[in-house]
């Protein structure tokens, strides 16, 4: 459910740039999970969509029609022809990489001229991260990197991208999801979640700037 909802947020970002792409032939989603966003790409009219997901469990959980779009392996530029795809996306993945610049450069090599690289990462300097400090969900043992708007822009500049845009992302999730994320005592959170999950209140969709930043760059 959550991956499906997140994919709609990312879909809205991509829609704003479709008219600037060379075409809709060739799209790669790095860290595709269960392929929810790959499904959105197909709906947007992209052909030759590939989702790269190194973990077997989310691939196995993908819808049958989407699973065929997923490759259960790590992302390697050598698996694709240079200058062959119009769009490469990477959502909530860059934090987990030991060499995010290497991934940005690898994506650059296989994008067509005027192709788009779009990443979404946690923003270390967001309001929520500043207020919550180390209680913020972005401080996670699995996160090897933390970005902000300045370092995100520098990442794309170092990768060779131009027409760079960096901006906050408004995520839209059900109230029960936001409640689960918020750092409140379990003694209060558990009964509150129980009420939300048993009533329609928990399914109310709320948009918030949850501390994520979008990094957009084009290949010249």
Image (cartoon, rainbow, N blue to C red):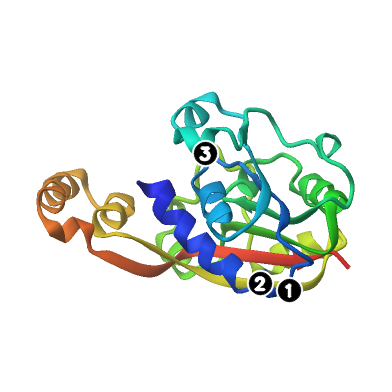
Instruction: Tell me the quarter of the image containing the C terminus.
Output: bottom right
Residue at point 71% right, 63% down? Answer: 151
User: Residue 108 location in percent, x, y?
Assistant: 84, 54
Tag 2 and tag 1, C-beta contact below 8 Å: yes
Asked whether 103 or 63 is in front, the reply is 63
Q: Left or right: where does residue 30 sit relative to residue 66?
A: right
Asked whether 151 or 13 is in front, the reply is 13
SS at circle 1: helix
SS at circle 2: loop
Q: What is the crowding at mark 3: few (fewer than 14 residues within 10 Å), some, or many (at least 20)?
A: some
Asked whether 144 or 26 is in front, the reply is 26
Q: Quadrant of residue 152?
A: bottom right
Number of on-image labels: 3
User: Residue 192 location in percent, x, y?
Assistant: 14, 52
Question: Alpha carbon of mark 3 to alpha carbon of mark 1: how far?
Answer: 26 Å
Front: mark 2 or 3? 3
Reading the image, the residue beneath label 2 is: 17
Relative to 62, is 101 above or below? below
Asked whether 72 or 215 is in front, the reply is 72
On residue 66, which mark appears? 3
Ranked by sequence position, the earlier of labels 2 and 3 is 2
Residue at point 44% right, 30% down? Answer: 61
SS at circle 3: helix
């Amino acid at each position: 459910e959550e991956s499906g909802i997140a994919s709609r947020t990312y879909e809205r970002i991509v829609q704003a740039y479709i008219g600037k792409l060379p075409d809709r032939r060739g799209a790669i989603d790095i860290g595709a999970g269960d392929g929810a966003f790959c499904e959105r790409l197909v709906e947007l009219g992209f052909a030759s969509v590939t989702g790269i997901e190194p973990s077997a469990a989310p691939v196995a959980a993908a819808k049958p029609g989407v699973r065929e779009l997923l490759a259960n392996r790590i992302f390697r530029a050598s698996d694709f022809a240079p200058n062959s795809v119009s769009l490469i996306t990477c959502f909530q993945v860059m934090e987990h990489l030991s060499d995010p610049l290497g991934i940005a450069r690898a994506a650059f090599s296989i994008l067509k001229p005027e192709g788009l690289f779009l990443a979404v990462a946690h923003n270390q300097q967001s309001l929520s991260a500043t207020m919550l400090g180390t209680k913020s969900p972005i401080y996670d043992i699995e996160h090897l990197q933390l970005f902000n708007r300045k370092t995100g822009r520098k990442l794309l500049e170092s990768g060779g991208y131009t027409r760079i845009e960096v901006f906050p992302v408004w995520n839209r999730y059900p109230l029960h999801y936001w409640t689960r994320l918020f750092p409140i005592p379990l003694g209060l959170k558990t009964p509150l979640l129980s009420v939300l999950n048993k009533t329609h209140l928990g399914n109310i969709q709320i948009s918030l700037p949850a501390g994520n930043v979008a990094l957009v760059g084009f290949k010249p």
